[in-house]
């Protein structure tokens, strides 16, 4: 169902001129459609989340895991965040 939704969303990204979503959405879709069977089976068993802390209910989506770890580290110490 996820892959079908991504596929149906791509024309909307192009029409709305969300170029990055459109461009990388196509790459993501093609990558997911070509997954080896072993990886696909792994995902279907529920092994598609990231755990930043131990525990059964502490899983988050991989993009959220990236945003909370690597994206913050990539900004470096000189960047000041403003809190609104």
Image (tube, rainbow, N blue to C red):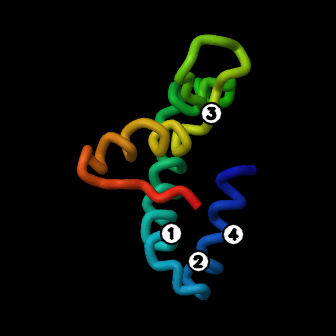
* First in sequence: mark 3 vs mark 1: 1
Foreground: 25 or 32?
A: 25
Mark-to-mark CA distance, 2 and 3:
25 Å
Question: Is disc 2 in contact with disc 4, using a CB cutoff of under 8 Å?
Answer: no
* First in sequence: mark 2 vs mark 3: 2
Q: Kindly identify the residue that appears in the image at 38 percent across and 46 percent down.
A: 71
Q: Residues within 10 Å of mark 3 (few under 14, many from 20)?
A: few
* Disc 1 target residue: 21
Mark-to-mark CA distance, 1 and 4:
13 Å
| Image height of 34 relative to 46, above or below | below
Given this view, does label 3 or label 4 mark the residue nearer the observer? Answer: 3
Image spot of residue 25 (x, y percent): 51, 64
Given this view, does label 2 or label 3 mark the residue nearer the observer? Answer: 3
Image spot of residue 24 (x, y percent): 44, 64
Question: Is disc 1 in contact with disc 2, using a CB cutoff of under 8 Å?
Answer: yes
Is label 3 in a helix, a strand or a loop?
Answer: strand
Mark-to-mark CA distance, 3 and 4:
24 Å
* Disc 3 target residue: 60
Mark-to-mark CA distance, 1 and 2:
6 Å
Q: Quadrant of residue 4?
A: bottom right
* Disc 2 target residue: 13
Q: Is residue 4 left or right of residue 23?
A: right
Quarter of the figure that contains the C terminus: bottom right
Q: Which disc is residue 8 wearing? A: 4
* First in sequence: mark 2 vs mark 4: 4
Is label 4 in a helix, a strand or a loop?
Answer: helix
């Amino acid at each position: 169902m996820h892959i079908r939704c991504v596929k149906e969303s791509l024309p909307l990204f192009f029409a709305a001129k969300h170029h990055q979503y459109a461009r990388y959405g196509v790459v993501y879709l093609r990558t997911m459609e070509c997954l080896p069977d072993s990886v696909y089976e792994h995902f279907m068993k529920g092994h598609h989340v990231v755990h930043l802390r131990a525990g059964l209910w502490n899983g988050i989506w991989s993009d959220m895991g990236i945003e909370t770890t690597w994206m913050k580290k990539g900004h470096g110490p000189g960047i000041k965040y403003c809190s609104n």
